[in-house]
Amino acid sequence: MTSPLPPLVTPPSRILMGPGPSDVDPRVLAALCAPTVGHLDPYFLKIMDELQGMLRQVFRTQNRLTLAVSGTGSAGMETCVANLIEPGDKMVVGVNGVFGGRMADVAARCGAEVIKIERPFGEVFDPAEIEAAMKTHRPKVVGLVNAETSTGAYQPMPEIAKIVHAQGGLIVMDCVTSLAGMPVEIDGWDIDAAYSGTQKCLSCPPGLAPVTFGDRAVAALDARKTKVQSWYLDLQMVKEYWGGSRAYHHTAPINMNYALHAALRCVLEEGLEQRWARHAKLHQVLRAGLEALGLSYVVAEPYRLPMLNSVRIPDGIDDAKVRSLLLQEFGLEIGGGLGPMKGKVWRIGLMGAACTPKNVVTCVSALEYALRKNGNNVTPGAGPAAVTAALLA
Ligand SMILES: *Cc1c(COP(=O)(O)O)cnc(C)c1O
C-alpha cells in the first residue's frame, strides 16, 4: 500500500515579529533560488570573497578571519568556544538569560572549567562584577551576550573588554540579535571573537553563522596544543577553504551563502547607521503603542533592545490564546517567554525587514483586539492612536 504524496510546500503568509526568524527580503529569497554551482566554482569563490568583505563592513572590523560558519547562530557560538577553549581552560560566562546559559553549556562540553556569573533574567552585568571575576579566577576566556534575545536586555561591552584585556583574557561576544539592528563595533570595542546568525536582524533564513576572530584570538588558535573538539567547526581547516588553499573541508551550503550575500547587500545598500536608526525609531513607536495598551517593559529603559521588546502579559490574559489568535486571524507571530519568563511575557521582535511602520501598526492594532477579545478592557483605539502620534513625532 502506498500513501498519497504530501502536498507541495506552500507556507502561509506570515509577519514574523517574534525572536527570530524574521521576515526575509524578497531579494534574499530570490538569491536562495538561484542555480547551485560547485563549491570550488570560480563564481562561488568570488561570492565568498565578496561575502567576507561585506561581513567585515557589517561587523565593523578589519579581521582577516571573518567568515560564515555552516549552521545557525548556535553553530557560531560553538565555533567561537570550541576553537578558543582547550580542556582545562577556565572560561567565565555571564548568564542572565537562555543564551548565556547555552554558552556555559557549550563551554563545559568543550572541557572548560566554567565559572558562571549570574544575574536575574532581564538584568545586565556591570564592569565591576567582571573585574572581580577576572581577579578571582584568571580565566582564559570571558563570554557575554550583547543582546540577550530571551529577555530583551542589552549588555554594554567596551568597558568590560578593556577590563578583560587588562587581566590577560579574551572576550567572546554573542551578537546574534544585535548585528545589523543596533551598533556593533568589533574593532571599536576591541572584541576578540564574535558570532552572529543570519535569521535575526540580517533578515536571511536561518542557516549560517557569521563569525570573526581578531589577532589575539587567532594567536590563541595557533597556540593550541590539542585538536579542536569539533571536526566540523575547526577553524584551522575551515579557514583554508575560506581564503587559504581553498582545500575541501565540507561542502559549503551554496545557496545559503547566496542568500547571505544578498542580505548583506541589502544591509549595506540601506546603510548600517540608517538601519540602526530605523530600528531605534520604530522601537519607540512600538513602545508608545504597547504602553498605551497597558503593557509594561521587563527591562529597565537604558538597557532595552530596540529589536526585541519584552513586555509583561497582563493579569487574567492567557498567553497561548492571544498568540494563537494573532497567528490565526492576522498571520502575525510574536514570541512567548523562555525559561522563568514562560507564560509571563511576550517578546515582540522588530528585526530587519520586519521592522516597518506597517508591521508596528498591524501588531499594536491586532494586540488591542486580542486583549479586548480576551476580556481586557483597554480603550478601543488607544494603541493605534499612540502609534500614530509617535510616528508623527
Ligand atoms: C537566536 C540566538 C542564538 C541561537 O541562534 P540559532 O539560530 O537559534 O541557533 C544565540 N544567541 C542569541 C542571542 C540568539 O538570539
Image (cartoon, rainbow, N blue to C red):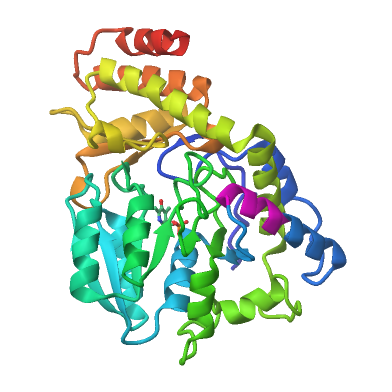
Q: Residue at x 70, y 55 (%)?
A: 53
| Image coordinates for residue 138, horizontal then vertical, percent | 26, 75
Q: 385 or 220, which is in the foreground? A: 220
As drawn, is 100 to the left or to the right of 256?
left
Q: Is residue 81 above or below residue 121?
A: below
Determine which quarter of the picture holds residue 337. top left
On screen, residue 52 versus residue 318, left or right, reads right
309, above or below 116, in the image: above
The residue at the point 23 percent across, 62 percent down is 131
Between residues 129 and 292, which one lies in front from this camera angle? 129
Left or right of residue 280, residue 116 in this image: left
- Picture quadrant of ligand 1: bottom left
Q: Main secondary structure of the magenta part?
A: helix
Name the residue furthest left.
315
Kindly tell me whether residue 373 is visible in this rendering.
Answer: no
The N terminus lies in which quarter of the figure?
bottom right
Q: As drawn, which residue projects farthest toward the front?
A: 166
Q: Which residues are magenta?
A: 51-60
Would you identify the image quadrant in which residue 69 lies? bottom right
* Coordinates of residue 335 in the picture (x, y in percent): 35, 40
